[in-house]
Image (spheres, rainbow, N blue to C red):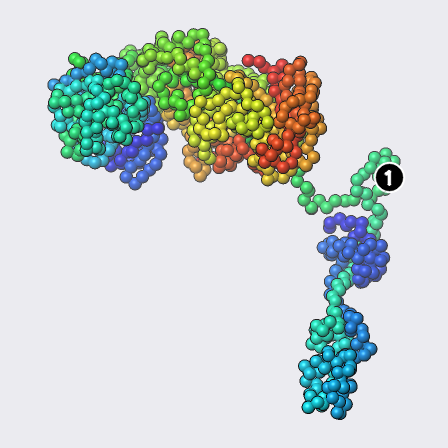
C-alpha cells in the first residue's frame, strides 16, 4: 500500500486553501486518510495512481478537484544538450532507460525525504519492487556528461551510497543492505547494469544502489535522473511522474538525448471519447460540454467535438488511462459519488437457490432436529489432524499448499470429521453432552464437493447412537444404503460401519477409537459419522 | 399466593388443632421425621402461614465418674470431711480419693499443712462445687470447672417450635384439599377417568426451569442465510463453484497483469498442480498484450500462458462470476454466491487465512454505475446499516470502481468491500456486450458487527457456549448515524 505523508503547510501552500477543506474532500478523489498528525496527514492512495504519490501530485489533482485550477497542466522541456549512450549488451539484462536533467531545485531535509518517498512508492507500485523499474537521482554537478548506461563486469569497483570504501558489484550484493535486498533481480546475469559519467565515475548500479559520489544533499542545485527497467512504458511513466512533481515544486526540466531519442516527453496523449458511452456507463445524463468540464476538473485537457464526442488530452503522468472507461471513471469522480441519485437495477429476474445449498439447508434442518449444533471449521488444516490423529494413512491425492504460512494450515480438508474432533477438543471444558455437526466444501483431488460430519460426546455415547443418527440422516435425505463392517482405524473394531450405496462407500459411522480420543485430548466416548453428500439422490454434478 | 404442597397442607391442618407445638410432636402426628416437618414448616413460614422458632436448649449429663460422685460427693468433699484435728498427711493418703481431693483442696486454699498435720482453713467449704454437681447451670464457673474435669458433659439440643399464624388459621378455615397428589399422569388415570378426581400436583412457576439447548444452525450461517435470502428475494441466481482455480480464472481473466503483486507467492496460496486453459484463451492473451478489439492499450509485454495454468486457492469468488458470464454471455444475468476465499496473510483477530465473500453480478442492457450504487445501498440498508456512503476505489477489473462504507457508531465509516463495473478487457473476450455490475463484499466483517465479535476466529473455532447462547431470532437493528 502506498501511504503518502502530506505536510499540511506545504499542501496548503501548493493548493492555496486550508487543510480542513482539503482533508474533507480528499477521500472523494480516491484515497483513505489513515492518520491525522499534528503537522501532516498520512494518506493511502491506490496503486493505479502513482501520480498521487507526492505532495506535489496530490496538490495538482486537488487544485482541480476543489475548482481552484482546472485543465491540463503544461510542462515545458528545454534541451539540456546532454546525451546518454545505452549499451546493446543490456538487451537481455535491463534494456530500457529514461532520463532528465532537473535544474533549480531547492532541497531542504524534508523535501529530500519527500523525493525519496516518491521514489520508493514508485518502486513499489510501478517498479514491482525495482525489478521492472528502478529510479536514481544524482547531483549533476558532481559528474561530467555525456553519460553511459552499460553492461559492466561484476568485478567493477566503486563506493556505494552510505559506504566509504570501494566494493565490487559482487561484493555489494553481499555486503550492502540494498544489495542483499535486491540481489535476486540481477544475480543470475553475467554482466551487471551500470551508469557512469564521461570520466568513468560510477553514478549508479541499477536497480541496486547509487554511488556515494553523486549523493543528493541540501546543497544540490541540479539533478540527473536515471530510470532503468524492463518495460519501456513503465520506465517512461516513472520518469514523467518524477519530472512533473519536481516541476510542480518549481524546478525546470531539461531533456536528455538517449540513442537519438529526446527524453522525457511531457506532452499529453490524446483520446477522443463518446459522450453517450460515458453516460451509458456512469448513468448520469451529461452533455459534451458538461463532460468536458468534469474532465478538466480532473486535470485533463478536454474539448467538446460536436454534441457526441469529447477530445481529451491525457497528462503524461496518468499511467492508469488505458481505456476510454478509465476517463469515464474520472468523470464519475468529478461528478461526485455522493451526488448520484442511486437506484436499484431495474432488471427483472427470478431468484434461484443453488441446489447444493438447498441440500445443505435440509442437512442443517435434520441435524438440528436430532439435537446437534452447527460448527463452521476452517477448510485448511494439516495432515496430523486430518490423518495421523485418526489412525488413518496419509493420502497421496491430498493437495498441499506450496508455501504454507504455518504448520497448522498446510492442506485443504478432504474430510470434515477430523475438524469436528478438533472442535470437541477446543470445547472440552464445556458441559456435556455435546453434539456437533458441520457441512461444507472439501476437496477430492482438484474438485470441490460437500460432506457432512457429526459427533456426539457424553458418558454413554456409543456405536448404537452413531448408527441410529446416521440412519436417520440417510433416511431423511432419501439415501438407500447398506451398512458393512468397516476397517476404518479411526473407530473401534466391531463398533464401526461403512455406509455403502450402490456398492460404493459414501460414509462411515461408529465409536471413535480411544487412541484417537487421546490424540484429541478427549476423555469421554465419541459417537460419530461422516457422509459424502454426493450420495444424495439428484445431487448436482459438475 | 404460591401453591401449597400436600405436606404443607397437612402441617397446617395439624397445627390448626395444636396451635403451637414442637417438631417432634408434629412429626408423630404427621407420621414423618422431625427433619421433614421442619423443612415443610420453613416453606410454609416463607408464605407467612406459620412461625418457626428455633430454640437452643442446653442439658448436662454425668460421666461415669460424675455419676459416682453423686453418691460419694466430690473427692475434695470426701477428703475435707475426713480431716479432723490432728489428722496427718499419712492418714489421708489411705483414701482412694486422696490424689484428686487433696490437690483440689490445696488449689482452692481450703486446707494447709502444718508440720505433719493437715488443717482446715476456717470458713471454707466445697458446698458451691457440690451444688454445681447436683444442679449444673450453663455458664456458671463451677459448672464449667466440672465440665473441664470430665465430671459433667454439656450438650446442646435444638428444638423447633412451630405455631400457626393468623393467616394460616384463616386458610385452614377456608378448607384445605389434602388428597394424595399426583406427579405424572398415567395412561390408566387418563383412560379410567380417575384424572377427574385426581389431585394433580401444581408446580411453582416462579421457579426457573432447567436449561436445555436445542440443536440449531451456527449464528454465522444464519447471518449468511439472511444475506442469501436478501439476494434471492432480489431475484438473483445462486452460484456455487470450485475452491481450486487456475490463475487464468482467478487473475488473468480479471485483467490482473501477470506481474501484479497480488499474484505473488506471499499473498496467494499456490498449488503445484496445473490446469489447462479454456477455449478462447487467445482472446485474453491479446487483451493483456494490446487491448484486443477495445479502446484499451492492454498491459503491453508478453502474456505467458504457463503462468495462467498454475492452480491457486481462489483469492476471491469473482473467479466464479467471470466463469458464469463466460457461459451465460446473453443478458440478463443476475447471479451471486457466498463462499470461502483464501489469502496468504498473517493470522490475527481480524485476519484469517480463509473467510467468506459475498460476490454478485448484474449484467443487462441499460444498467449503469448508478444502479450499482443503488444495489449496494439497498443491500446494506436491508442488513440494518442505514447510512451508506461511496468512495472511489481501485480494482484491476472494474471501472468505475467504488468502496462502499457503512456508518457504525463508535467505529465511524467502515469499509465493506469493493464494487465496480467490469472493464471491457474483462467482458469482451467472452462475448459479453452489456455492462456488468459486480461486487465482492466482506461477509465476516458484517458478522463481527452484527454478532458483536472482537475476534474473527470465533466464527470458525467457536466456543460452544457462545453458540448455545446465541438466539436464533436476532434481527438487524437499524443503526442510524446520529
Quick check: can you spot residue B144?
A: yes
Of B436 and B443, the residue lying toward us:
B443
Q: Please give the chain letter of the residue carrying mark 1.
A: B
**Residue placed furthest toward the right:** B192
Q: Residues within 10 Å of mark 1 (few under 14, many from 20)?
A: few
Question: What is the quadrant of residue A93 in the picture?
Answer: top left
Q: Provide the secondary structure element on which disc 1 rests.
A: helix
Residue A480 location (% of width, % of height): 69, 17
Of B79 and B475, the residue lying toward us:
B79
**Residue placed furthest toward the bottom:** B85
Residue B441 location (% of width, % of height): 46, 25
- Describe residue A510's horizontal placement relative to residue A101 as left or right: right
Question: Residue sitting at 35 percent across and 16 percent down?
Answer: A325
Q: Name the residue under label 1.
A: B194
Q: Is residue B195 above or below residue B365?
A: below
Assign the C terminus of chain A to one quadrant of the image. top right
Assign the N terminus of chain A to one quadrant of the image. top left
Residue A431 location (% of width, % of height): 63, 39
Question: Residue sitting at 31 percent across and 23 percent down?
Answer: A184
Residue A234 location (% of width, % of height): 28, 18
Question: Residue sitting at 38 percent across and 22 percent down?
Answer: B264
Question: What is the quadrant of residue A153 in the picture?
Answer: top left
Amino acid at each position: 500500500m502506498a501511504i503518502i505523508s502530506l505536510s499540511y503547510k506545504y499542501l496548503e501552500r501548493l493548493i492555496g486553501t486550508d487543510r480542513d477543506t482539503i482533508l474533507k474532500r480528499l477521500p472523494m478523489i480516491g484515497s483513505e486518510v489513515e492518520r491525522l498528525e499534528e503537522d501532516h496527514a498520512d494518506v493511502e492512495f491506490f496503486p493505479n495512481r502513482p501520480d498521487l504519490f507526492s505532495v506535489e501530485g496530490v496538490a495538482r489533482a486537488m487544485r482541480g478537484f476543489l475548482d481552484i485550477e482546472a485543465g491540463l497542466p503544461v510542462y515545458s522541456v528545454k534541451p539540456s544538450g546532454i546525451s546518454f549512450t545505452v549499451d546493446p549488451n543490456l538487451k537481455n539484462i535491463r534494456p530500457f532507460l529514461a532520463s532528465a536533467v532537473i535544474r533549480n531545485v531547492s532541497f531542504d531535509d524534508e523535501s529530500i525525504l519527500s523525493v525519496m518517498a516518491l521514489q520508493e512508492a514508485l518502486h513499489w507500485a510501478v517498479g514491482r519492487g525495482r525489478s521492472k523499474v528502478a529510479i536514481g537521482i544524482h547531483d549533476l554537478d558532481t559528474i561530467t556528461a555525456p553519460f553511459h548506461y552499460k553492461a559492466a563486469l561484476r568485478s567493477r569497483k566503486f563506493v556505494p551510497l552510505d559506504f566509504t570504501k570501494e566494493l565490487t558489484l559482487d561484493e555489494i550484493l553481499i555486503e550492502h543492505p540494498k544489495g542483499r535486498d535486491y540481489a535476486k533481480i540481477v544475480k543470475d546475469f553475467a554482466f551487471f547494469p551500470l551508469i557512469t559519467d564521461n570520466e568513468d565515475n560510477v553514478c549508479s548500479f541499477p536497480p541496486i544502489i547509487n554511488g556515494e559520489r553523486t549523493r543528493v544533499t541540501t546543497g544540490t542545485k541540479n539533478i540527473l535522473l536515471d530510470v532503468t527497467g524492463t518495460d519501456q512504458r513503465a520506465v517512461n511513466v516513472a520518469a514523467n511522474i518524477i519530472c512533473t512533481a519536481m516541476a510542480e515544486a518549481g524546478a525546470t526540466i531539461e531533456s536528455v538525448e538517449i540513442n537519438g531519442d529526446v527524453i522525457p516527453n511531457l506532452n499529453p496523449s490524446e483520446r477522443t471519447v463518446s459522450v453517450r458511452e460515458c453516460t451509458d456507463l456512469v448513468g448520469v445524463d451529461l452533455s459534451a460540454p458538461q463532460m468536458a468540464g468534469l474532465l478538466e476538473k480532473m486535470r485533463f485537457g478536454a474539448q467538446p467535438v460536436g454534441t457526441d464526442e469529447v477530445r481529451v488530452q491525457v497528462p503524461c503522468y496518468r499511467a492508469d488511462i488505458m481505456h476510454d472507461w478509465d476517463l469515464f471513471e474520472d468523470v464519475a469522480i468529478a461528478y461526485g459519488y455522493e451526488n448520484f441519485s442511486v437506484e436499484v437495477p431495474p432488471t427483472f429476474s427470478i431468484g434461484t437457490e443453488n441446489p447444493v445449498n438447498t441440500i445443505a439447508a435440509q442437512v442443517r434442518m435434520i441435524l438440528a432436529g436430532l439435537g446437534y449444533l452447527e460448527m463452521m471449521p476452517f477448510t485448511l488444516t494439516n495432515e496430523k489432524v486430518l490423518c495421523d490423529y485418526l489412525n488413518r494413512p496419509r493420502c497421496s491425492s491430498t493437495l498441499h499448499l506450496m508455501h504454507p504460512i504455518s504448520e497448522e494450515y498446510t492442506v485443504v480438508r478432504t474430510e470434515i470429521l477430523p475438524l469436528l474432533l478438533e472442535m470437541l477438543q477446543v470445547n472440552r471444558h464445556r458441559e456435556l453432552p455435546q453434539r456437533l455437526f458441520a457441512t461444507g466444501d472439501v476437496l477430492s483431488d482438484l474438485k470441490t464437493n460437500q460432506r457432512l460430519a457429526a459427533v456426539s460426546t457424553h458418558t454413554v455415547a456409543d456405536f448404537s447412537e452413531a448408527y441410529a443418527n446416521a440412519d436417520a440422516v440417510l433416511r431423511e435425505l432419501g439415501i438407500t444404503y447398506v451398512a458393512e463392517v468397516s476397517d476404518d482405524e479411526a473407530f473401534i473394531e466391531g463398533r464401526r460401519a461403512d455406509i455403502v450405496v450402490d456398492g460404493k462407500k459414501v460414509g462411515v459411522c461408529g465409536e471413535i477409537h480411544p487412541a484417537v480420543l487421546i490424540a484429541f485430548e478427549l476423555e469421554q466416548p465419541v459417537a460419530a459419522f461422516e457422509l459424502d453428500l454426493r450420495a444424495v439422490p439428484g445431487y448436482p454434478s459438475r | 399466593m404460591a401453591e401449597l404442597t400436600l405436606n404443607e397442607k397437612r402441617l397446617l391442618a395439624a397445627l390448626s388443632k395444636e396451635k403451637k407445638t414442637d417438631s417432634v410432636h408434629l412429626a408423630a402426628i404427621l407420621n414423618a421425621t422431625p427433619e421433614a416437618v421442619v423443612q415443610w414448616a420453613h416453606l410454609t413460614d416463607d408464605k407467612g402461614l406459620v412461625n418457626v422458632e428455633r430454640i437452643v436448649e442446653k442439658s448436662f449429663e454425668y460421666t461415669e465418674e460424675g455419676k459416682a460422685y453423686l453418691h460419694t460427693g466430690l473427692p475434695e468433699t470426701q477428703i475435707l470431711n475426713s480431716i479432723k484435728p490432728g489428722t496427718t498427711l499419712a492418714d489421708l493418703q489411705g483414701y482412694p480419693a486422696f490424689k484428686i481431693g487433696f490437690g483440689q483442696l490445696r488449689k482452692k486454699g481450703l486446707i494447709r499443712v502444718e508440720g505433719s498435720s493437715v488443717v482446715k482453713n476456717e470458713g471454707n467449704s466445697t458446698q458451691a462445687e457440690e451444688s454445681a454437681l447436683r444442679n449444673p447451670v450453663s455458664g456458671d464457673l463451677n459448672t464449667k470447672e466440672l465440665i473441664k474435669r470430665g465430671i459433667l458433659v454439656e450438650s446442646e439440643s435444638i428444638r423447633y417450635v412451630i405455631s400457626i399464624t393468623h393467616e394460616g388459621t384463616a386458610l385452614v378455615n377456608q378448607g384445605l384439599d389434602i388428597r394424595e397428589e399426583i406427579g405424572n399422569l398415567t395412561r390408566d388415570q387418563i383412560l379410567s377417568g380417575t384424572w377427574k378426581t385426581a389431585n394433580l400436583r401444581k408446580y411453582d412457576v416462579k421457579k426457573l426451569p432447567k436449561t436445555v439447548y436445542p440443536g440449531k444452525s451456527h449464528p454465522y450461517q444464519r447471518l449468511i442465510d439472511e444475506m442469501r435470502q436478501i439476494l434471492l428475494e432480489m431475484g438473483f441466481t445462486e452460484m456455487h463453484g470450485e475452491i481450486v482455480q487456475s490463475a487464468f480464472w482467478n487473475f488473468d481473466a480479471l485483467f490482473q497483469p501477470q506481474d501484479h503483486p497480488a499474484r505473488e507467492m506471499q499473498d496467494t496460496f499456490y498449488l503445484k498442480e496445473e490446469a489447462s486453459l479454456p477455449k478462447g484463451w487467445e482472446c485474453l492473451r491479446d487483451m493483456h498484450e494490446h487491448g484486443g478489439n477495445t479502446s484499451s492499450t492492454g498491459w503491453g509485454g508478453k502474456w505467458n500462458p504457463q503462468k495462467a495454468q498454475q492452480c491457486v486457492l481462489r483469492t476471491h469468488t469473482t473467479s466464479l462470476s467471470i466463469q458464469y458470464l463466460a457461459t451465460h454471455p446473453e443478458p440478463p444475468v443476475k447471479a451471486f454466491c457466498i463462499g470461502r476465499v483464501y489469502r496468504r496473510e498473517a493470522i490475527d483477530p481480524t485476519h484469517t487465512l480463509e473467510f467468506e465473500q459475498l460476490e454478485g453480478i448484474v449484467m443487462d442492457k441499460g444498467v449503469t454505475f448508478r444502479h450499482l450504487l443503488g444495489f449496494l445501498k439497498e443491500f446494506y440498508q436491508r442488513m440494518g446499516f442505514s447510512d451508506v456512503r461511496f468512495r472511489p476505489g481501485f480494482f484491476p477489473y472494474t471501472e468505475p470502481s467504488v468502496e462502499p462504507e457503512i456508518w457504525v457508531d463508535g467505529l465511524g465509516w467502515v469499509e465493506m468491500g469493493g464494487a465496480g463495473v467490469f472493464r471491457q478487457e474483462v467482458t469482451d473476450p467472452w462475448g459479453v456486450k452489456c455492462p456488468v455490475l459486480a461486487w465482492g463484499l466482506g461477509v465476516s466483517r458484517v458478522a463481527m458487527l452484527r454478532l458483536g465479535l472482537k475476534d474473527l476466529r470465533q466464527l470458525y473455532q467457536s466456543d460452544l457456549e457462545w453458540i448455545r447462547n446465541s438466539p436464533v431470532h436476532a434481527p438487524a437493528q437499524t443503526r442510524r448515524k446520529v
